[in-house]
Image (tube, grey):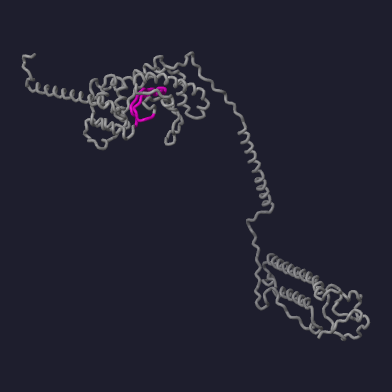
Amino acid sequence: MPPRKRKAAEAVATPETGRNSRRRSGRISSSGKRSAYFEGDDNDSGSVDELADPRPRKAAKVEAKSPRRKSKAKAKKESEDELQHEDEDAYEDKDSDEAGDDDDDVVDDGDVFEEYKDAGAEESSDDDLGGNDSESEAPPVRKRGRGRPPGKKAEATPVKKKANATAKPRSATKAKVKAKAKAESEEPDTKEDSDDEDDEEENRITFIPAIKLRDTDGVDYEDTKLHKNTFLFLKDLKANNKREWLKLNDKEYRRSLKDWESFVETLTEKIIEADDTIPELPLKDVIFRIYRDIRFSNDPTPYKPHYSAAWSRTGRKGPYACYYVHVEPGKCMVGGGLWHPEAAALARLRASVDERPHRIRRVLADPAFRETFLPTAKAGSEKAAVKAFAAANKENALKTKPKGFHPDHKDIELLKLRNYTIGKKIDDADLLADDAQERIMGIIAPMVPFITFLNSVVMPDPNLDSDSDEADEADEADEADDADNADDAGDAEDGDEPDGSSDDF
């Protein structure tokens, strides 16, 4: 049972006389304060208030131990620093003295272990907070150091620092780093300068002088003929086929387009007089636009360098044959017919050629038609007219016979055709003349029977069936008479007399 703790009053009243009267603590306080655990020591010089400290024993221990812990950590750090410096000194000695012994180059692990051992002994003595005098006099237990044990220590091989032969001086490296930093600092300035220049270019205003319209040279614009400035504009458009150029010359384009529209409007009235099947349609349904569809074309030019118009029962579009006028400097022409008809319309045309070939032969052999569009064909020869017509449309014709027809067909050249068109070139002066529209109508009038025949085959009218049958019967009778006359001519050549007596002559 532990002894009863005396109070402060009892300690003052009855001081102890002997050294060994009571057990005393062998702990040495690091803080310089006396222990409050035992009272009545002969050497105690503290006051009663200090002995009567109300704090518990554990708190006093902690307070006394905290400064010692700080000092132990500091001592441990200093010992590690000393070890590090000793290692560095050993490495430096190895580099400076190559002829020395190997023992001088190696740091002695035993010394390191002894230092750690002393530090451990000190820690063990400091951490021993209890016990009597006999326990303190006992030999301290060796603690294992942080290094390897002495029995298993290995020779430390110092790392020799190799001199870099290619190492550059520090001054040169610093200069290079400074130059690189300077270059990087200058790059944003260059970019900012370029951005400023771009902004200036965007904000820069360019004054383009206004393009004046061409002089008319005293020639007024008229509805029945084209003006020479219209041809000059088309010529310039072909040389400068760009959107920017047309935008700059928009006024000239508008003036030439108006001249062409007025010419077409007056020409439409004359065409309607020649062919009553042509209705009066708006200009937008007759005139072709100059804008090209370049989505599937190898030609990137955005505009057509010509004006053109087509007249049919449905205007410039539809299944009917049409009359066509093309205005282009050096390539003006007047024509008509069916250009790339649909498959059904083309099948009807080939059937007509196969079943009733005399109808198309009669149209092609017409004197007015032949003289206007087939001048190379021999007069009065249907075969020559057919041959000339097939040669004019051979560009897109089939190379072989169409499906379903015999290759030895007498009209195989007509059956191979995929276009049934005709045309006649005219000079630019014809459209600049005062009688320009009369000259155009002189070409369109012989074309009316040809356009009528094509429309009757492609889109036949109900009232034309009886007329065509009667015409076919008359044609068959004429062919029979021709055959009889040919037979009589053959008999006369053989010496036989024709029917009738010789008295008839």
The residue located at (53%, 26%) in the rendering is 248
User: Does residue 111 sit above or below 231 in this rendering?
Assistant: below
Residues 61 and 232: in front is 61
The residue located at (65%, 69%) in the rendering is 157
Residues 409 and 139: in front is 409
Q: Quadrant of residue 266?
A: top left
Segment colored magenta: 317-340
User: Does residue 358 sit above or below 88 in this rendering?
Assistant: above
- Quadrant containing the C terminus is top left
User: Does residue 47 sit above or below 504 in this rendering?
Assistant: below
The x and y percentages for residue 32 are: 86, 73
For residue 245, side relative to residue 282 (left or right): right
For residue 39, side relative to residue 232 (left or right): right
The residue located at (34%, 21%) in the rendering is 276
The x and y percentages for residue 94 are: 68, 67
Q: Quadrant of residue 156?
A: bottom right
Residues 163 and 469: in front is 469
User: Does residue 452 sit above or below 67 in this rendering?
Assistant: above
- Quadrant containing the N terminus is bottom right
The x and y percentages for residue 76 are: 75, 70
Q: Is residue 321 magenta?
A: yes
Q: Quadrant of residue 20?
A: bottom right
Residues 317 and 164: in front is 317
Number of numbered discs overlaid on the protein picture = 0
The x and y percentages for residue 369 are: 29, 21
Q: Is residue 452 magenta?
A: no
